[in-house]
Each structure stands twice: as structure tokens, then as C-alpha cells.
Image (cartoon, helix red, strand yellow):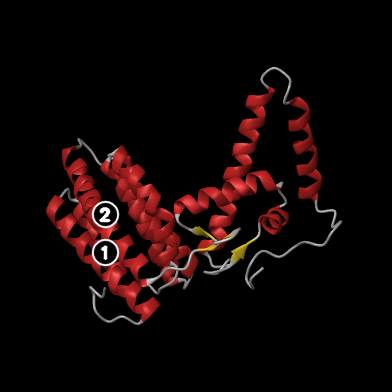
Amino acid sequence: MATGGPSRPPSGSGDPGERILAPTTRTRTRTVHVAGGTEQAGRARTSLSALAREAVRERIVDRRYPMGTRLVEREVAEELRMSRVPVREALRALVAEGLLELLPHSGVRVRRLERADVRYLYEVWEPLAVQASRLAARRVAAADGPPPELEALRAALARAEEAAGADEGALEVAAHTEFHERIVALCGNPLLARTMEQLGWQLQLLFGMRAEPAHMRAQHADIFRHIAAGDEEPAAASTLLHVRDSRAVALRSLFGDTSLYTK
């Protein structure tokens, strides 16, 4: 396995997680023929798969699994102290999300972002982000009082500023990602929310690979101010500026590009 991938724990380590997991697996096997047992087994496996997916996602985003790292199902399962079935399902789901890619013969690896990948991602994100801010401002303007999602948006902005002040890069990236997610939640359009959800982890992966300049943090404050005032077009315009600046910073950080629209 490539350097930076999951490490294999010593055999017979007696870790409590291993002792807990084994009986759970055996219990699922024994109850599968009991009334309702198949459904219970399916729910348990789905829950474990979701946990595995979240754990692997975090390791990709915080670069414990760097780009290009080959992930071996058995080794990931041992690291997470899970059986291989939920891990296999988690890896498949992450391939669908775009964080992992299939290798030509077998297995998966952490996706390498190429210049074209970044361009495609921003081409999709830009109009969606702009429309989300416009709709969020519209909802605020139409409401009798501030929607509860507006306070959550304010809190995400505050967390990003606190993380930047404390030089906590990973927390800042998470807070910036949350800020954009909160705008989508505030806009109240479930179809837009489902579409944006597919981009969320790829954006967070990208955000974590480049520095966040101070002027871009200030742009978040401008976006929030316009949304909170219910000003649709200023909110949309400030978001457009922010996304295009973000794209330029990403291309410069990752590939040394100096042109905003480098192909």
C-alpha cells in the first residue's frame, strides 16, 4: 500500500473495538433467519457502512490518505476495526462521490485532482452557489422574522473567523465549507440542496489543499451581510466574486496558474 495509507494494527492486539465488533457480527449472522432478522441485519450493515464512509472521508479530506494513495479494503477494515463488507460498501460509495477512483485492474485510490477536474467542479458550483445566495436572501426578505437557518449561517461564519485567528487550518476549512452548506439550507430549495450535497466533499477536499486568503474571508462576511439584509442581487454578485476568486486561488495553489480562466 502507498505511503500515507492506513496502517495495519498488530495481530492479537486485544483492542476493545475488536472485541466488541466480533460478537456483533456473529449476532447478525445468527439472527438472519429469525423473523425480522434480515431487516435488522441490513440496518446494522448500513449503519456500519455509513460510519466507515465517514471515517474514510475524514482521512481523505484531512490528507491522512493523500491524493493517489491506494486503499486496500482489508487494511482499511483493520484500521477501522470493522468487517470488510461495510468497508467495501463505503469505498464504493466514495467512488460514486468522486473522492476515490477505481484502479484499472482492482482496488481504489484517492482521486488526484487535475486542472480539468478543478475547472469542471467550479463550472458546476458557480451557478449553484450564486443561485443559493440569491434564494437565501429572498427567503429572508419574505420572512416575518429572521429564519432560524440565518443564525446557523452566522455561527458558521464566526467559527471560521475564530479558526483563522487561532491558525487552525482544518477547522477553518470545515467552517468555510459549512458556511456554504448553511446558505443552501437557508435557501429552502430541497432539489438544489441534493445537488449541492454531491459536490460538498469534493469542495472540502479542494478547500483543504489551498490557503484561504484574508480577502476571501472578508467576502464571506459580505455575502452574509447581503443575505441577512434580504438583498438578492448584491448577495448573488458577492457570491459570484467569491467563487471566482476561490477558483483562481485553487488553480494557483495547485498548479501555479495565474489566469482566472486557465483551460
Q: Mark 1 and mark 2 in contact (Cβ < 8 Å)?
A: yes
Mark 2 secondary-structure assignment: helix
**Could you say where residue 250 lies in the image, as x and y percent from the top left?**
35, 72
Q: What amino acid is labelled 1 in the image?
A: Val
Q: Residue furthest top?
A: 35
Labelled disc at residue 243: 1
Residue 248 position by quadrant? bottom left
**Could you say where residue 48 lies in the image, as x and y percent from the top left?**
63, 42
Query: Are there few (<14), some (14-19), or many (20+) residues within 10 Å of tag 2?
Result: many
Kindly tell me whether residue 175 is visible in this rendering: no
Label 2 sits on residue: 129
**Could you say where residue 156 lies in the image, as x and y percent from the top left?**
38, 55
Q: How many marks?
A: 2
**Could you say where residue 208 lies in the image, as x and y percent from the top left?**
45, 68
> Residue sitting at 58 percent across and 66 percent down?
65
Q: Quadrant of the C terminus?
A: bottom left
Labelled disc at residue 49: none
Mark 2 or mark 1: whose residue is earlier in sequence: 2
> Residue sitting at 31 percent across and 62 percent down?
120
> Residue sitting at 35 percent across and 58 percent down?
157
Residue 9 position by quadrant? bottom right
